Amino acid sequence: MRICIAYDCLFPWTVGGAERWYRNLAERLAADGHEVTYLTRRQWTDDDRPQIPGVRVIAVSRADELYGADGNRLAGPPLRFGLGVLRHLLRNGRGYDVVHLCSFPYFPVLAAALIRPFARFRLVVDWFEVWSPEYWRGYLGPVGGRIGLQVQKTCARAPQVAHCFSARHAERLAEQGLKSPPVIIGGLYGGPTEPQPTRAAEDLVLCAGRQIAEKNIPAAIEAVAQVRARGVPLHALILGDGPEHAVVHERIAALGLTDVVDAPGFVSNEELEDAMGRALCLVHPSSREGYGLVVVEAAAHGTPVVVIDHPDNATAELVLAGVNGFIAKSASAADLADAIIAIRDAGQPLRESTAAWFAANAKRLSLGDSLSIVAASYSR
């Protein structure tokens, strides 16, 4: 088949769960003998161009910073990328059997939906998240939020094969007007699925991910301080970077934890894997997640996780309380501290239970299984 994937980021020039998903998808499809084109924005220098075997990478918009100082997406780059996708499909749309997009940032979906009746390709859209009206208002304000919500609804109502990565976002997508049931994709995990020996835990709390307001990393730091105040000699490792990186360091200093909490930014994959294997737990207090790959990656090491209960947080679907971690009532430092203490008190049996949970769900959570579901959906 002739397949066009369009996403405005490309791994490893941009790092994230969706970036890895589309890179892996392109490589898998090319390896299976499909003709694959990947549309993105320019993220590389002339001497560092993408070289993905069997995949033609085309930059349809210029290099741009995606995020403003507040950590929110800027409007200009997705508009330019959407226009680039539109121009490309106007010229080349009839040459594709499938056009596969991410729903966010919406403009490419609008462009592909406009061209699809004439080019007659199958439109496939991944919906990692479906934002609620409340979140739209908080993100763009009352007027901008209404406009954003309407754009989201317009994209949902376009004829498409829709993929969702969680039950709660699949339900929201149906409420937004999707015309056919979405295909549920169970996993994005690309690591080994064989059972791994669980290591004895150190008194280490790990946080890993993009440091934006929704991730609530400062609350995790405060939780570490509260646990230490209860007499537990915890340390913490905060991995990742983002607009709130300076805030993270400020909170560490304000709490007098510079010798206790380390926040070095991005590290190598080997260092991340080592930290996951020896950590007491992964604390992931994000209030907005469409899936939560890092939760599965931790479970693969037998490391329990702490997530929070929030309407926009799909990671809670990956956690069974007392089996592979705990779901804190909120992102407050007190609730996070209680969950950390519960994991420490549960000890090695919880680590063994987490490893058993991963082993039982590894196939459903695996990237290979999901890619097979996607390939089948192309001919749906």
Image (cartoon, rainbow, N blue to C red):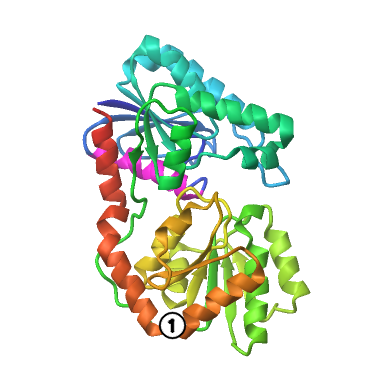
- Toward the right, the furthest residue is 254
Residue furthest top as drawn: 118
Residue annotated with mark 1: 346
Q: Is residue 324 magenta?
A: no
Q: Residue at x 26, y 64 (%)?
A: 360
Percent x, y of residue 146: 66, 29
Q: Is residue 156 above or below residue 370?
A: above
Which sits in the foreground, 151 or 271? 151
Residue at left offset 73%, top offset 61%? 247
Q: Position of residue 56 (x, y in %)?
A: 37, 30
Does residue 81 appear in the picture of this structure? no
> Bounds of the magenta span?
15-31
Residue 139 image offset from top left, x and y in percent: 67, 41
Q: Is residue 266 visible?
A: yes
**Is residue 349 found left or right of 43 in the rendered image?**
left
Is residue 239 rendered to the left or right of residue 315? right
Say which amino acid is labelled 1.
Ala
